[in-house]
Image (cartoon, grey):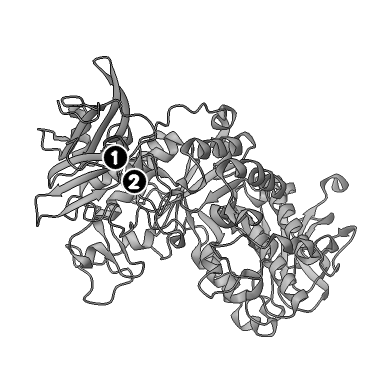
Amino acid sequence: MNTIQNYPIMYGVSRLSELDVYLFKQGNHTKLYDKLGSHAMEHEGKSGIYFAVWAPNAARVSVRGDFNHYHTDAHPLKLREDESGIWEGFIVGVEQGVTYKYHIHSKFHNIVHDKSDPFGFYAEEPPKSASRVWSLENYEWDDHGWMDVRHGHNAHNAPISVYEMHVGSWKRKVEEDNRFLTYRELAVELVGYLKEMNYTHVEFMPLTEYPFFGSWGYQVVGYFAATARFGTPQDLMYLIDTLHQNGIGVIMDWVPSHFAVDMHGLINFDGTALYEHDDPRQGYHPEWGSIIFNYGRNEVQSFLISSAMFWLDKYHIDGIRVDGVASILYLNYAREEGEWIPNKYGGNENLEAIEFLKKLNVSVYREFSDILMIAEESTAYPMVTRPVDIGGLGFGFKWNMGWMHDSLKYMSRDPIYRQHHHHQLTFSMWYGFDENFMLPLSHDEVVHMKGSLINKMPGDINQKFAHLRSLYGYMMAHPGKKLLFMGGEIAQFAEWSFERSLDWHLLGYPLHSGLQKMVSDLNALYSRERALHLFDEKREGFEWIDDRDYGHNCISFIRKSDIPEENVYVVCNFADHTRENYCLGVPYEGEYTEIFNSQSHYYEGWNIGNTGSLKSEERVMHGRPYTLTLTLPPLGVLYLKRDVDKNN
């Protein structure tokens, strides 16, 4: 027994069983957060904190913190005798909230580090970097109603429309030194906004603790810690709980592709490349200046899978968007020839990482079958969203980056030239059902001098808004789940900046508020009309009417339900001319009604379209027995539906 300032340390106390150690070493432990890190315990009638950390190449490890005035040697941990590489000890009298770090002497090169806890649940607010002793058990969830039915909200046949956002810049208190909104404040303002906008889900850019605010959360040090910038872990739980009580699912960005170089983090943790590769051709990310995980090390697999499981378990997260999957899959990602090491077959696939991703998805879906695992994967790697047992990676959904790039490139062109690039509209349907896709218009497209969405559009101010309205109308009708980054719904002119609030004052101008209303209405329509979401990743949910009218910059198609009367007929006119007497082939006779028009005056459009019922005539068009004669608004998208009541 060792003591300082009435905080004795006791050995022989452990939360780890032999099975825990075995699973950890095999890469199959999925809940390490219950075992490693700091945990309140009682032992022999004494209350205190149990500390455990993996540092197999350390010669000595001690805990230094508030309680011992950051003394480096007062509270040494003891190395377990089972070759696990885990150091542990029980310090009596330590209470919740105190800060601490692990003081690690390596066996090699006299390296000494002070490290934050890889399994810490909470930390000091950056730029401070110590971990905090913190319990997650004293929050009472009130989202049972949501949790009981969320399988329906996350299903492949459900409407999923996601609002992607960066918590630190969505809205700020400008009058209070431009400070962030807290998690608790967001539980009021954000929840109300998402309901008004009819979003089904919100996706938070990473909330795992990170040192540099300018990384947007994508260079992580705390894989089990909610960032302290916006409040306590319980405050984040309250935000998620409130979202759930209001019927809104929560997706979180998670970054297992790389981690921050900050020395209090995982890098060179015990004086060796413990979590990473030693060779920079494998362990250093040249594009992001960060460190790549060693997916071939079993303990690292246990660490990462436990992190994903942690957010699903302790925070009731409904989905995880896995960042940078392409950089995980390929050994030569962002590297020139000679800067990477081929796999054992001479190829560029990271075989160990591929097995890790499969194990990750199998593990989380086994425990939480009703959640979303979403891959941000930018290549044509096959079967990303197919089951592991048939050779896939096992994700639920994949971001359709090809659709995003092609659509934005097409929309950025002057309409006079679009006929020569018609394939950029139609190509997505050649592969559109190879994966379970989500269509993103994400944060990546409105940063780094790429310009905002509204400023990508050609023409004068009125034309820019017409183009953007038509893009959103096309997106919501195209097969695939939907995601829009914050600011896009109000047509923010400025590129997104993590350092300031969105330009909410723009809603004082009719064009901006009209676009916002249209996005809200589109979300509601997407949820209400089964044909627009039921078969989002199945071929039976889509049928071209005419994909070859490049001369008019027009495409038309049917979004199909399992009930033909519910089908929605979509016509997109990406030319800047009104098309009078435009003929559209339809399969059924009767009357049709325009249920959406992106150029409606309700959205500050040009009020060109079709009022009242449109009656089909018996005339073959587009291989179908009946024809509708329409007025297509310039730069406009129409949704039509057969009027069942009038046709019975």
Secondary structure of the residue carrying numbered label 1: strand
Q: Which residue is mark 2?
A: 130
Mark 1 residue type: Gly
Q: Residue at x 80, y 52 (%)?
A: 642
Q: Quadrant of residue 377?
A: bottom left
Q: Position of residue 33 (x, y in %)?
A: 32, 36
Mark 2 residue type: Ala
| 179 versus 146 height, above or below | below
Q: Is residue 109 left or right of residue 276?
A: left
The answer, for residue 225, to whether it is visible in the render is yes
Between residue 416 and residue 244, name the one nearer to us.
Answer: 244
Q: Which mark is residue 65?
A: 1
Between residue 89 and residue 527, name the one nearer to us.
Answer: 89
Q: CA distance from mark 1 to mark 2?
A: 8 Å
Q: Position of residue 176 (x, y in %)?
A: 62, 53
Asked if disc 1 and disc 2 are in contact, CB closer than 8 Å, the reply is yes
Q: Quadrant of residue 606?
A: bottom right
Q: Is residue 570 left or right of residue 206?
A: right
Q: Residue furthest right?
A: 612
Q: Position of residue 442 (x, y in %)?
A: 54, 62
Q: Is residue 121 left or right of residue 571?
A: left
Q: Residue at x 18, y 44 (%)?
A: 55
